[in-house]
Amino acid sequence: MFQSFDTPTSPEAGPPRLAALREEMAKAGLAGFLVPRADAHQGEYVADHDARLAWLTGFTGSAGFCIALADVAGVFIDGRYRVQVKDQVDLGHFTPVAWPETRPAEWLKAHLGEGKIGFDPWLHSVSEIESLEKTLDGSGIELTAADNLIDRVWPDQPAPPTGPITPYPLEFAGEAHGEKRARLAATLAEAGHRAAVLTLPDSIAWLLNIRGSDIPRNPVPHCFAVLHDDGSVDLLAAPGKISEDLRDHLGTGVRLHAPDDFGPLLRRLQGAVRIDPASCPVWVRMELEAGAAEVARGSDPCILPKACKSEAEIAGTREAHLRDAAAMCRLLAWYEAADKTSLREIDIVTALEGFRAETNSLLDISFDTICGSGPHGALPHYRVTEATNRPLQEGDLIVLDSGGQYFDGTTDITRTLVVGEAGAEERRCYTRVLQGMIAISRLRFPKGLAGMHLDAFARRPLWEAGLDFDHGTGHGVGTYLCVHEGPQRLSRISEVPLQEGMILSNEPGYYREGAFGIRIENLIVVQPAAPLDGADAREMLEFETLTWVPIETRLIDPDLLTRAERSWINAYHAMCRNKIAPRLDEATAMWLHRATEPI
């Protein structure tokens, strides 16, 4: 099993750790200290070595941070984690703070008259600190770079990961890394930049056609790189990660360095050197400013090209989704035949991973499977443990969100299941969520629009009933890379225009605290829209569906559906039968035919 069911933190561990941190703050003359979720690479997922926020507070969500002051410690969490945080932290010592509704600067002004707030410059981006400094200007509260105080008081902190770096085959990447380097170097030269500092592991992995194993569920290596305007690259990685095969793969255009060489290398750079303020650690800017370089600001040059998948990447992703759909169908057929009230949440997670493993292609799961039954389903990022492993009960809805990492692609799918018969209210809410998912799936839109322009289409059916959900409608997805990938998103805050080849999730939901949750998710890829008779000549885009797994029709209230929505469901289920049935054993194929009968 890739997934474990241990309880990684406990609320009672937090208070003594917070007390130890406050002692170090006092020794350093600090009124407070920032503890982010991030590591030096600003990734969403972190290695055990970098799980400082979870170690201090007990909160294990994938986004958030803590501001520890002498008499109060705020744990800032977004709408996905408002319920979860209450169960994971000691509420007598840590105060949950709704973020981004409450900005950290305003919170600091309300709780601290003046003083110095320490932060580790490795763990905060340039834009994050500059924004905080701007809003604190004139308040008497000052940010100051400092050693990481958590590392001083964490006696058994795990060692940094040292997984090997391996080549990623050209047949799946679709473009040799030399060609990628030359293509991106040309964009740097055109902008007048001599080099760009790369700090995101998935950017470096994509650029050099390499993969790693330093982050659970995400096949990326911990490393840094500098891309030069001549197409050469300086790659900084621990020597133990480097094999002869990797040296041969990288060739002479990629120079290898030990991590300790990063600072001296940055100080030797000359001319305009690009950093991406959204992801570049403050430490990198400080080193560049200490040298001869002129710090230039711009986007990570890999971000957009990585998001627009090559034909080979899309073809591989399609195959990965067909393989994964067969495993999901086996799980759903198994679930239908099971005595459901004898099952617990872990039973479903274990069975699903087993079916994926039997493909003989599964390299990892793409994130810890979310299997939340009944009230647990109202926690969007619920992770089942031995302690929370709930038995299924009659009438429960089950949010089952999972994915696999395969050499040819990354999958992410959510289906909502039911135990027995659901109530009318659950069916009404489920249908509204489904209508939102269908709206995105059917959408045609002018080229140049961003996720912020499309997000409301998924919410309209919910809004009409006075309902909503507190997360984005969709995130970008990599190709045997991170399951959460930027810059593309279906979100009211995403300003990045959607482009051909971008893969996204389409996952509206609804969550009623203490009662039930609903989410339905397919992956989609942006493609040119088919021409229409009588239409304008302007370029239009649409989405190709990648996920082919039946949707639970017993939860649909058909009276709420339009004729077009009903037609979409029936056409989608016909495609599921055509694409997946040949990959199934006879018994599962029979289940698939029953599950996809027209409504």
Image (cartoon, grey):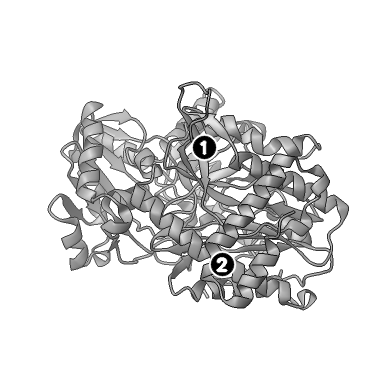
Q: Are marks 2 and 1 in contact (CB under 8 Å)?
A: no
Q: Is residue 146 above or below residue 110?
A: below
User: Which x, y percent locates residue 398?
Assistant: 72, 62
Q: Residue 242, located in which quarter of the rendered image?
A: bottom left
Tell me if 179 is positioned left or right of 587 in this view.
left
Tell me if 95 is positioned left or right of 67 in this view.
right
Looking at the image, the residue that sits furthest to the front is 533
Q: Nearer the viewer, residue 540 or 40?
A: 540
Is there any visible trace of residue 29 in the rendered image?
A: yes
Give the label on residue 542, or none: 1
Q: Is residue 344 above or below residue 429?
A: below
The residue lying at 68 percent from left, 46 percent from top is: 567
Mark with earlier residue (2, 1) = 1
The residue lying at 70 percent from left, 62 percent from top is: 372
User: Which x, y percent locates residue 184?
Assistant: 25, 38
Q: Nearer the viewer, residue 191 or 180?
A: 180
At label 2, the amino acid type is: Ala
The mark total stands at 2
User: Which x, y percent locates residue 111?
Assistant: 66, 36
Q: SS for tag 1?
A: strand
Residue located beneath label 2 in the image = 581
Give the label on residue 406, or none: none
Q: Nearer the viewer, residue 199 or 93?
A: 199
